[in-house]
Image (cartoon, rainbow, N blue to C red):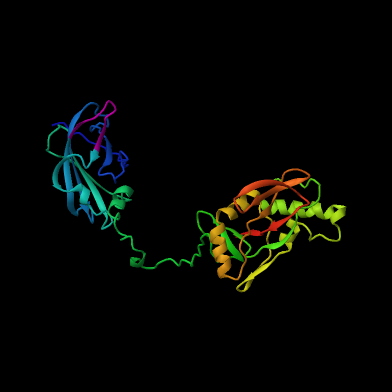
Amino acid sequence: MKLRLALFLFVFTSLSIFSQTPEKMSFQAIIRNASGDLEPNKAIGMRISILQGSSTGTAVYSESHSITTNANGLVTLEIGTGSVIAGSFTTIDWAASNYFIKHETDLEGGSNYTIVGTSQFLSVPYALNAKSAENVFSGNYDDLTNKPKIENVVTYAIGDFAQGGIVVWVDETKQHGLVCSNENLTAASWGTFIHTQARGDGLYAGADNTTMAVSINFDNESNKGNPALYAARTCRNYSATQGSNTYGDWYLPSKYELNLIFASKSVINTTAAANSGQALLNDAYWSSTEINDQRAEGIDLTNGQAAEILKTFSNNIRAVRRF
């Protein structure tokens, strides 16, 4: 029989990506004869074995393939899909040991394997190794060793007495949000007939509105010397102490924020009563959202009705702050 030589080049990749861990891996080899010429379109027989521990270790799995090379002498097969000789490919514990692949070839297409080669898996197939670790964690945090340190996370709910006032809104983390003051501030006018450009309306928009209203109204000649007689300045000057903390970053709520207060009016009043505070009145309250040089937005907390009110009218005030 003419002596032939098979030179093998190996490429291992996981094949089709499934929702479950792949149960096979790809194997490729280039078949050449003794002269070094390719063996195109050649029917051959191959036996693949997975050895544990060493190149002469125990075969934990073996399978056979009858396959034909392509026009370039390349043969491609999927380990795990051949005719099983012994063992189970899907139950190999890839993390338990070093593994070697033994490949035997019969260039006549039978099972008289005369060409043998063995090589080590230099890296365990990731997806297959991951399969053996799928159920390592029970799902119970207390079962872990070397548990990471997790600081206590404080969360809030609408109606909580916290952060200097009463919580009226929280974000999806429940760690941040908006509070209103625990009391009504002294009623005051919005300002004088002048444009302040305090047009913001939305969550936290009241902070910028307040800054603009304070600045423009203060510069207006009629308010100089008595800057506290309007709503935005009243909120800016307000502070509240809760526990050991004093909070001084209050502002006049935007129309949107004032609506949040109305939406939680009942729970706010309950919390205020339990913490020596004041209930929201069934009356008009200022927002910081300006309409034009003469009017600004207000809301009647009796029924939530919005109103365009002359800036020089005196209305109720409830300050807010973000946390």
Q: Quadrant of the N terminus?
A: top left
Q: Quadrant of the C terminus?
A: bottom right
- Residue 286 lies in the magenta-colored region: no
Residue at figure coordinates x 20%, y 47% from the top left: 89
Give the image location of residue 57, x and y in percent.
19, 54
* Residue 44 appears in the rendering: yes
Nearest the camera: 230 or 61? 230
Give the image location of residue 182, x and y in percent.
62, 65
* Residue 106 appears in the rendering: no
Residue at figure coordinates x 71%, y 64% from the top left: 238
Residue positioned most to the bottom: 244
- Relative side of 186 to 87, left or right: right
Does 139 appear above or below 60?
below
Does 164 appear above or below 198?
below
Give the image location of residue 180, x and y in percent.
62, 60
- Relative side of 172 to 306, left or right: left
Nearest the camera: 159 or 281? 281
- Residue 72 lies in the magenta-colored region: yes
Which residues fall within the magenta stretch?
66-77
Nearest the camera: 87 or 138? 138
Give the image location of residue 103, x and y in percent.
21, 43
Q: Quadrant of residue 285?
A: bottom right
